[in-house]
């Protein structure tokens, strides 16, 4: 959804396992495109499928469609991240889709895990340092913002 980038988190600190609408590329030659240009083309009155200016291949947003491989960055970084994180926060997911759904299980046992969700999912609640905040996500996050004193930001 791009909220992380809008919040100012640098892209080098993000692992967008399922991609993002913030970038686009040609599926043939991998040429990069500004996603706003692609969005404008798709939403224009001439609504056309975006084509690469270099090779005429299809241009798509950098999101992972069902059946596509996750980005290399995901596979490169998750072993380190599951060992070295200070805290793991999981929000709004059933953790049913693999391989992302397995990540909370790979986190070292010493690392606290926080689940913000409508209901318990995955293995959350089985470790002594698990914290579950169950309910509507918007309400829970709003309460956290108040408790942490982040209302001015």
Image (cartoon, rainbow, N blue to C red):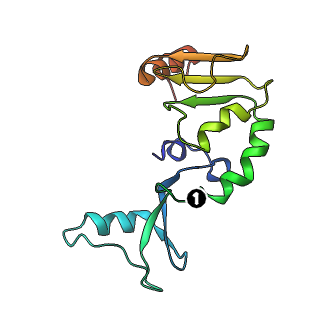
Q: Is residue 121 above or below residue 14?
A: above
Name which quarter of the figure residue 82 lies in: top right
Q: Residue furthest left?
A: 45
Q: Is residue 108 above or below residue 2?
A: above
Q: Position of residue 138 (x, y in %)?
A: 42, 24
Q: Is residue 37 left or right of residue 6?
A: left
Name the residue located 67 percent from the left edge and 47 percent from the top edge.
13
Q: Position of residue 18 (x, y in %)?
A: 53, 50
Q: Is residue 15 left or right of residue 133?
A: right
| Residues packed near mark 1 inside 10 Å, few (<14), some (14 to 19) or many (20 plus) | few
Q: Is residue 59 left or right of residue 78?
A: left
Q: Position of residue 72 (x, y in %)?
A: 67, 59
Q: Position of residue 33 (x, y in %)?
A: 47, 71
Q: Is residue 10 above or below residue 142?
A: below
Q: Nearer the viewer, residue 89 or 152?
A: 89
Name the residue located 43 percent from the left edge and 63 percent from the top edge.
35
Which of the image's four quarters has the N terminus? top left
Name the residue located 53 percent from the left edge and 76 percent from the top edge.
31
Which residue is label 1 attached to?
69
Q: Nearer the viewer, residue 15 or 149?
A: 15
């Amino acid at each position: 959804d791009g909220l992380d980038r809008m919040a100012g988190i640098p892209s080098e600190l993000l692992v967008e396992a399922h991609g993002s609408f913030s970038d686009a590329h040609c599926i043939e030659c991998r040429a990069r495109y500004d996603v706003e240009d692609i969005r404008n083309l798709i939403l224009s009155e001439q609504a056309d499928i975006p084509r690469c200016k270099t090779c005429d291949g299809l241009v798509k947003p950098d999101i992972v469609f069902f059946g596509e491989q996750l980005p290399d960055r995901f596979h490169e970084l998750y072993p380190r991240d599951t060992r070295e994180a200070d805290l793991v926060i999981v929000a709004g997911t059933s953790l049913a889709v693999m391989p992302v759904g397995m990540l909370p299980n790979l986190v070292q046992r010493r690392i606290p895990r926080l689940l913000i969700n409508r209901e318990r999912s995955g293995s959350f609640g089985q470790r002594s340092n698990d914290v579950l905040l169950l309910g509507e996500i918007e309400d829970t996050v709003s309460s956290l913002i108040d408790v942490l004193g982040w209302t001015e930001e």
